[in-house]
Image (tube, rainbow, N blue to C red):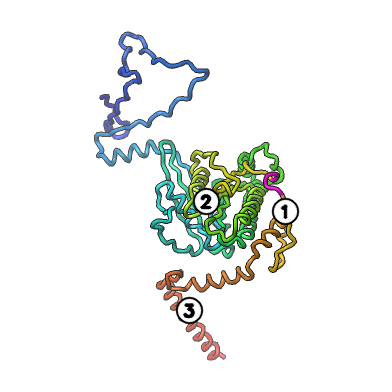
Amino acid sequence: MSMQGSAAGGAAQTEVPPPPAPNGMPPDAGAADGKPPPAADVAPTDSAAPPAPAAPQIVVDPTKDLWQNIALNTKENNLPQSEANLFVVGCSGAGKTSVIQRVCSAIGAGGNTSGKGKTKVKPTTALDYQYTTRSDRHVSQTVHFWELAQGMELSQLCEVVITPENVHLMHIAIVVDFSDPSSMWDTLAYWLKRVDRRANEILQKMRAKGSNTPDKLHARAQRALGEGHPDLKRVRLSGLPTVIVCNKVDAFPGPMEQMKTLTRCLRFIAHLYGAYLVFSSDADSAKLRLLLNHLLFLTPFDARQVELDVERGTILIMPENDTFVDIGDPPLCDGPSGGPVTQSTGDSELDRWKVPLDAMFPPKAGGGRAQSDAMLKRLYDMGEGGFGEPTIDTIRRQKDEELEQYRKSAARRDKGDK
């Protein structure tokens, strides 16, 4: 072995010899007589193949122990870093936490995707964060998961998650509950517009400062749709890759004809905003994992998994796979029969599809207020389904009592001064 002196401190370092040549000859064979070694037989090609990435060189310092050498080589041969963010929003109880678990389980980072031995998931309180890391030979990838609970109640936290620093790495997942079809349309319309408004706020400020990030994000969204797509001028692109996850498909309460109509409505709103559409359930989440791993970890995507017909299989639609012509016109309907009159969203394109959907699945009256009241009760509930924290709640009661005593003593002092 050849020994090489260290520039810092004079410590000797031993270099691992290079591997033998592919033809089995030593690396220096043929050098003694001045002739190059014989080249291996290679079939002629029209263009030279790109060179394979060089293996990292391992340096062993005999003055250091095993773990110090491992740390030295890990630091010198550190893999490039890649990051992504996934902001998960949607209906309360739709299965947002389960969606994150399915993505993590696909890379062996925990979670449970099957009905057998399914772990009990405690509902998220407000805004939850977790991350997972995946490493391969060429890159170390980290995905940050942000989950917003309680439907639209805490939507202002959207501004905490989507920021100018991470907008170029942000992905959105809107989860809706197929077992409650009456809530799906309003949830989707609200969050698609809410995310679009937040993205526009950030991108306009960045554009005013001369940043080219907004143009890059818009160009990326156009490439996902297809620059020659016939609906390019009509689709509303926010610049953030958005996935509509229709969860609990196996719990849909209606017949197949209603599911087909609902699927067309979902295809329309997804295509209008250039979003991905995927159906999922506890028993069948393979396509959901395939899509999210493709978007977040850049894994290969199998185009054969695309499905637009709910009768033939689980729906998975990429933005470039659908067109408004293929989706067709909304079913004709005068309004909800026996239910409340459909409230306009102020968007004529969305209202055309909302009317027949409300007729088929009348919206529940007062759902938002009931949800808010239930949330307030659960905040201080010490039971299994609540979010109460005995230590925190005890301290709060103590501080409330101290504040009340201070107010009373201050009032008595004021009377004494008079």
Q: Main secondary structure of the magenta part?
A: helix
Q: Amino acid at mark 3?
A: Asp
Choose between 362 and 293: the one closer to the eye. Answer: 362
Lower sequence index among marks 2 and 3: 2
Residue, x 70% and y 43% (percent of image)? 231
* Image height of 300 relative to 335, above or below: above
Residue highlighted by disc 3: 400
Instruction: Work out how far the residue at label 1 is from the one at label 3, CA to CA, in angstroms.
Output: 51 Å
* Number of the front mark, 1 or 3: 1
Please report the bounds of the magenta region as a residue range.
324-328
Lower sequence index among marks 1 and 3: 1
Is the C-beta separation of discs 1 and 2 under 8 Å?
Answer: no
Residue, x 51% and y 63% (percent of image)? 126
Taking the image as shown, residue 77 lies to the left or right of residue 408, namely left
Choose between 387 and 356: the one closer to the eye. Answer: 356
Q: Amino acid at mark 1?
A: Glu
Residue highlighted by disc 1: 349
Taking the image as shown, residue 304 lies to the left or right of residue 265, namely left
Find numbered disc 2 in the image and state the secondary structure of the residue it sits on: strand
* Image height of 342 relative to 20, above or below: below
